Image (cartoon, rainbow, N blue to C red):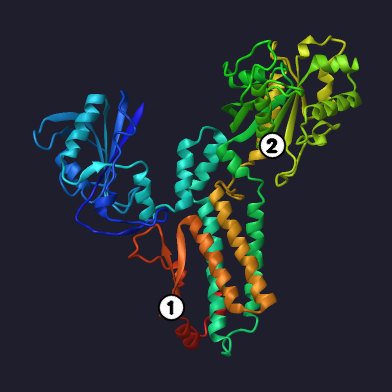
Amino acid sequence: MLKVWLLLTFGSRNTSYSSPIASLVLTDSSQLTSDSQQLGYGKCGVAVIRITGPKSSEAVTKIAGLKLPLQPRYASLRRLKDPESKEMLDKGLVIWFPGPRSFTGEDSCEFQIHGGTAIISAVLGALSKLEGFRPAEPGEFTKRAFHAGKLDLTEVEGLADLIHAETEAQRKQALLQSEGILSKLYNTWRETLIRVVAHVEAYIDFSEDENIEENVMDQVEIAVKDLMKNIENHLTDGRCGERLREGVRTVIVGEPNVGKSSILNALCQRPAAIVTPIAGTTRDVVELNINIGGYPMVLADTAGLRSGVSDAVESEGIARAHKYAHSADLIILVLDATKYIAWTNQVQPSEFTEFVKNSVTDLNLDYISPKAYTLNSSMNIESNCESTKKCLIIVNKSDLVQETMNLKNIPQQYSNVVPLSCKTEDGFPALLTHLEHHLAQLCGNPSRENPCLTQARHRHHLTDCLSSLESYFKHSQTDGDIVLAAHQLRKALRHLGKITGHFIERMENRGSYIMLSLNKPSQQFDVVHGLCRCWDWLLWNFHLFPFFL
């Protein structure tokens, strides 16, 4: 077992940072952070104490006894001593990471010590005796890395998702995002918009100059249309990335006593829901997180659906079941095999379709599409279609049906139907295969070629960006007001920048554009690809306008 404690130090520097989350100015004294208590104490094999800040070298020299200059990224076995009493505390590894080549961009070090409670307390107590050392706030190391420009907002979110990933597919998606796959995509779009804005501004300022190409606005229009198409395609991903990050909301519905709770318990492999022969045992929604084939599922058991209920509690449970099903990504409809046989006395495809149709009608399941129970239907609903939902039909209690009424023939005509017996566990391998197939369709396959949206925040800003680009065409083509059109482009650019943590400001006194990076000290300007241009000097002296498109 490994535990990590974080400590931060501060010196005399007074560097101000601009926070993109809360509009505050944080100085060194207010942002020195540390979080030794929040992870809790407990016995473990190895504990890691991480330190960052201008005075990190003092911990290495005064606690570990290393001499300056320190060798970077080299593990030294040292005796750790109290800086005042010189009493030995423990023997462990010490690693020095000089800034800016560290996670936080500052001078940092690690103490890898034994994980006993007393040892950890002693080392932390010794560090607290050094001037300027304090515990880190939750997530402050990552926050400092963000301020130092080591990570942008999408990479920070990817890192958080990677830490909280519980399934293999979640790990893959989070790892790709933490490596900057979304950051690269959004930065590419942002750089395209920067060029477009620069051209439109130049056209406004120098439209009467002969050095401006006549077709410059046509080229701008082409670039904006291509960008809009790319953003639209990115937005119509069916929420695959968000489902994979949060889990596919799956609900089990059906009549009372058809085996819904038994199926839930079998899938989560523990008695999470109460199972009794009494109809209406489940009254509320029972929600669990499970892993199916590497995909996350938020599985919910619900109250049995029936009409003519006089019990107020059961009526509320039924209402909650319908409400949850309306918002679910995948619906599992459980039917009773004995009722089907009693209804038809034969296993015929046409009869089964009619039986399911009647059941859906009787239970008021209007959100289940007829495609779910038509012959040879795989229920491949388009990912961007929110009006219909994926549905899997389970015919439970198949063990109670006579051998002459073989329900195993049903899947041959219906690819979305699974005969099952919770008592004998017959049919569970097929159920898991069907569930994994549906989850793979709903979550997609994380890849570098087609990165997916993972946050509602991204979708919000991209939607606003697309709206601003549409307004650009309205003002430039319909109204003929190029100045207002340029304003809409700047708004679109700002929305893109908010996703990664960057924004664009115009320096009116110079007639040029500079990108200010929210994840760097405000004194530092990140000049994107030499985009800080003095237009009149470039245009009049070098005639370089066509070069920038």
Residue 351, image x, y percentages: 90, 24
Residue 148, image x, y percentages: 35, 55
Which quarter of the figure has residue 301? top right
Q: Is residue 134 above or below residue 403?
A: below
**On the image, numbered disc 1 is attached to which residue?**
508
Q: Is residue 210 left or right of residue 435?
A: left
C-alpha gap between disc 1 and disc 2: 52 Å
Which quarter of the figure has residue 329? top right
**On the image, numbered disc 2 is attached to which residue?**
326
Which quadrant, please, contains the C terminus?
A: bottom right
Query: Residue at (63%, 13%) from the top-left corner?
Result: 275
Query: Residue at (74%, 32%) from the top-left corner?
Result: 391
Q: Identity of the amino acid at label 2? A: His
Q: Nearer the viewer, residue 21 or 383?
A: 21
Q: Is residue 147 above or below residue 339?
A: below
Query: Residue at (72%, 15%) from the top-left corner?
Result: 421
Question: Disc 2 on helix, strand or loop?
Answer: helix
Which numbered marker is on residue 16? none
Question: Disc 1 on helix, strand or loop?
Answer: loop
- Residue count near mark 1 (Cα–Cα under 10 Å), binned few <14, some 14–19, many ≥20: few
Q: Nearer the viewer, mark 1 or mark 2?
A: 2
- Residue count near mark 2 (Cα–Cα under 10 Å), binned few <14, some 14–19, many ≥20: some
Q: Is residue 360 above or below residue 15?
A: above
Label 2 near label 1: C-beta < 8 Å?
A: no
Q: Is residue 541 visible?
A: yes
Q: Nearer the viewer, residue 510 or 538?
A: 510
Residue 432, image x, y percentages: 67, 25
Residue 449, image x, y percentages: 61, 50
